[in-house]
Image: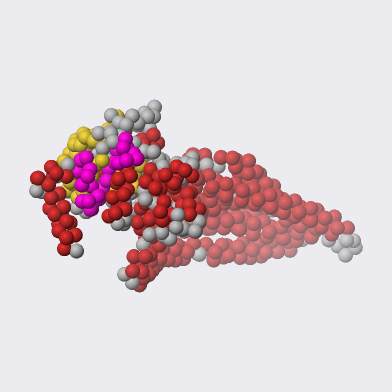
Amino acid sequence: MLKILIDKVGEYKKDTILTPLFMVGEVALECIIPTVMAMLIDNMSSESLDPVFKYGGILLLLATMSLFCGFSSARHAATASTGFAKNLRRDLFYKVQDFSFEDIDHFSSSSLVTRLTNDVSQIQMAFQMLIRMAVRTPLMLIFSIIMSFRINARMALIFLAIIPILGIGFVLIFLTAHPIFKRIFKKYDALNNSVQENVAGIRVVKSFVREDYEIEKFNRASEEVRKDFTKAERVLNISNPLMMFCIKLAKDLICAIGALIIIRTRGSELSAGQLSSLISYGVQILVAMNMLSMVFIQINFSTEAATRICEVLTHKSQLTSPENGIKTVKDGSIRFDHVTFRYDRHSDREALSDINLDIRSGETIGIIGTTGSSKTTLIQLISRLYDVTEGAVYVGGEDVRDYDLVTLRDAVAVVLQKNVLFSGTIKDNLRWGNKEATDEEIERVCRLAQADEFIQQFPDKYETMLSQGGTNVSGGQKQRLCIARALLKHPKILILDDSTSAVDTRTDALIRKAFREEIPETTKIIIAQRVASIEESDQIIVMDSGRIKEHGTHDELMKLNGIYAETYNSQVKGKEEE
């Protein structure tokens, strides 16, 4: 885990190294100051101000140098920690981009968002503390103890006696807080999931007037986080009174024993100035111990965050491009060879069972079936969004697992059920299909998708700004824009997953007519609920419970008088009654 995280320092190694170096300078100077202060106190007299000017000047110089070192250390630490967090967040995001649907299902989208935001922030704070406080604290302890022994060994033993009290207290705090911190991250995921679901489905929430229910659900998740944080804070807050007790105990012992030594030895063993410096070193030692406890607590809190982040960074996706993968897709032919698929490889439940299907390049295939019949699952295997559990899927005569993933997915354009548009102009959104597309190409595919007509009615036409998710266009307009975007890829296989459900039957017919005439060589797979959308297809597949129940042309399936005929008759009869 440490090796993975250290690699993310990257180009910020210089700042990472300079931070502790300047910190060493600051600590050394701070530890010299009490000794110089002791000299000033011991050499002060009513006869001359020379010692004041001499030692005062030295103290001013030391303080200025210490300030410079502290400022430089803080500046480099800020640069190093923020740069480290940037690299870590970037690599996490890049890793997630390579995840398959199965990988995202494994982690959950809300958990991935928490890891990219909160967990990275925790590690950033821990990293900054490590290169600053984790260096300052032990050095301050060592230097202050050494200087204390140089002044008076017997008095320095007081500090050594108090340090174990603090140490034992901090260890107990650490052991008690760790399990609580571990729970907090999982509850953060639940809280984030609640917020994410609410924001994504805000229209549904308001339509059903379920704001109170969502507020209650959020409050429950928020309360769980609050309870655990309260427990953790109660445990951690014990460190402050323990620290103050030890500081006051040390001061009282030093003052009492020091005064006794000064009186008995008349200053020969311990002077007033040395007593003052011992008090200063005592405070430095105990404050360093308190800072050490803070470092341990932050590391403790961040260890779980680091573990969660490394889980993502080291996750081996089951779906990867093979070495020397095929770089060319010959044509749009598709073959399913005894394909069985399970979303959970350890489950007995099959989403698809023994699928056998041959599709010639350029054919139009219609797929129909009840909700939950695994129509979408079937087409997701073509572009290898999931891998088959058994059997094989062939595209262009080659197993999809032998293709370079980018090559395969560039050859397959999928317009999914959930159409997504991004904030930006219509033209920007369409160029997701081909970033090099010319204005003429964009207008051509929009005419094919029957989108040009409504775009021309906007005041800014193709420069019209779309809001996030395309909420300022209708469902049918959104679907047509997504179809146009897919066509810009010039795919060998075009898959429409119920992507014309929001358009009227006339527009649907015009889109299919344009496909037949303008892209005859492209294999077209249309999943639909309306029989009218697929009845002219070269092949029609009827799916039920993850199996192909019927397969043939419209006329052949009508003669079977099965599921397809029943669906067709019910829809035609419904139209006639209407």
Q: Quick check: 239 above or below 451?
A: below
Does 524 appear in magenta?
yes
Residue 399 in percent (x, y) is at 29, 31
Q: Magenta region: which residues?
A: 516-540
Q: Is residue 81 left or right of residue 524?
A: right
Does 470 appear in magenta?
no
Q: Is residue 344 visible?
A: no
Q: Quick check: 190 above or below 547?
A: below
Q: How does the figure colour the protein chain or chains?
A: secondary structure
Rendered residue at 31%/35% (across/down): 521
Q: Is residue 17 left or right of residue 428?
A: right
**Residue 539 lies in what quarter of the image?**
top left
Rendered residue at 53%/44% (across/down): 87
Q: Is residue 565 left or right of residue 113?
A: left
Q: Nearer the viewer, residue 275 or 385?
A: 385
Residue 224 in percent (x, y) is at 38, 65
Q: Quadrant of the N terminus?
A: top left
**Residue 278 lies in what quarter of the image?**
bottom right
Q: Is residue 316 left or right of residue 238?
A: left
Residue 375 in percent (x, y) is at 24, 47
Q: Nearer the viewer, residue 60 or 143?
A: 60
Residue 494 in percent (x, y) is at 32, 41
Rendered residue at 42%/66% (across/down): 226
Rendered residue at 13%/54% (across/down): 569
Q: Quadrant of the C terminus?
A: bottom left
Q: Nearer the viewer, residue 325 or 123?
A: 325
Q: Is residue 434 visible?
A: yes
